[in-house]
Image (tube, rainbow, N blue to C red):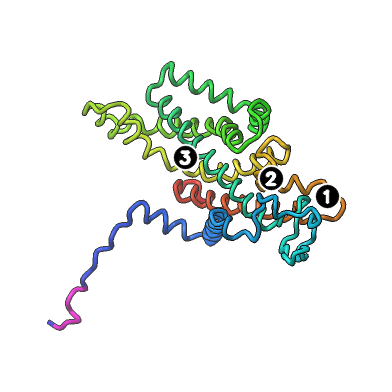
Amino acid sequence: MTDAALPAVVKPVAAQTPLQRIVSEFAESKLALFGLALFVLAITAALLAPWLSPQNPYDLAKLDIMDSRLPPGALAGDGFVFLLGSDGQGRDMLSAMLHGLRISLFVGVVAVSCALAIGAAAGLAAAYFGGGVESLIMRIVDIQLSFPAILVALILLAVLGNGVDKVIMALVAVQWAYFARAARGAALVERNKEYVEAARCLGLKQSRILWRHLLPNCLPPLIVIATIDIARAITLEATLSFLGLGVPVTEPSLGMLIANGFDYLLSGVYWISMFPGMALTVVIVAINLVGDQLRDVLNPRLKR
């Protein structure tokens, strides 16, 4: 028998792990990869803001009111070049935007993380225990969702006052209900499955069943909501800061920078509002591109 007559050896194909499958399917979308690259770039710029900024926008000793509202590329009295112009206080717009991006991303990520933790705990408890616990939690969620988020945030900040921590508290208060409803819906599907019944028969503690068994299987939809809600939280923070109820002027976010230049738009000083607005738009679009692809990957039935 010749070698040609021998049967070909079929090499077994290694099965992909769930994480490898998610990464490979996510990489199929060039738009999603582009959005992810922009988001990573924004995070990197925010983290390195103190070193990337040509000027410290918080150092009042280095600010000169004579350098206020200079156009992009203008020279200051000491020879400093304002690449993106200066604002009404004489701050370098590029430096202010890098620090403002840092605050906006910090508020969005921390607020969504806290809302995810609170909402997931409430939703899992409602689905697992049922009865009066479920009725109480879901009635609170229904009442919360019946009011516009921006209205609730405005009322809370009018009571709490300005500050980054106050904005985070307000955003957590208006966002946790979305995660609670999603977690309850996912947990209702999972709670009667065989692995949960087996855990109950083994006598495992209810807390362990909730966090070690139910939660991991309910995470995919929560991750998608969290990704998109980061963009929503950043938008809400910018809106609140623009209205004067968000972060204080001493801690400029992108929304506060847009508000600072609003009064000068009619006089032709466009750069104070335009550049922070463009940065805010790019970040929100990038996050939404990533969230859309994650939704398609984690739930193939929604794939277009």
| Nearest to viewer (mark 2 / mark 3) | 2
**Given contact means CB atoms under 8 Å apart, are the residues at marks 3 and 1 in contact?**
no
Counting residues from the start of the chain, the first of labels 2 and 1 encountered is 2
Q: Position of residue 19 (x, y in %)?
A: 37, 53
Residue drawn where x is 66% and y is 49% of the image: 58
The spot of residue 196 in percent (x, y) is 30, 31
The residue beneath circle 3 is 222
Q: What's the amino acid at mark 3?
A: Leu
Seen in the image, is 230 located left or right of residue 189?
right
Give the distance between the C-alpha atoms of the residues marked 3 and 1, in whole angstroms.
42 Å
Which of disc 3 and disc 2 is earlier in sequence? 3
Q: Residue placed at 42% from the left, 40% from the top?
A: 219
Disc 2/disc 1 C-alpha distance (Å)? 15 Å
Instruction: Say which of 195 and 290 sits in front.
Output: 290
Q: Report the residue that reaches farthest toward the front.
A: 61
Q: Amino acid at mark 2?
A: Gly
Query: Which residue, given by chain and number where applicable, does mark 2 sit on?
Result: 255
Q: Quadrant of residue 69?
A: bottom right
The first of marks 3 and 1 along the sequence is 3
Residue located farthest toward the top when viewing the structure as drawn? 132
Question: Residue 273: within the magenta?
Answer: no
SS under mark 3: helix
**Which stretch is magenta?**
2-8
Q: Secondary structure at mark 1?
A: loop
Q: Which residue is mark 1?
A: 264
In the rendered image, which quarter contains the N terminus? bottom left
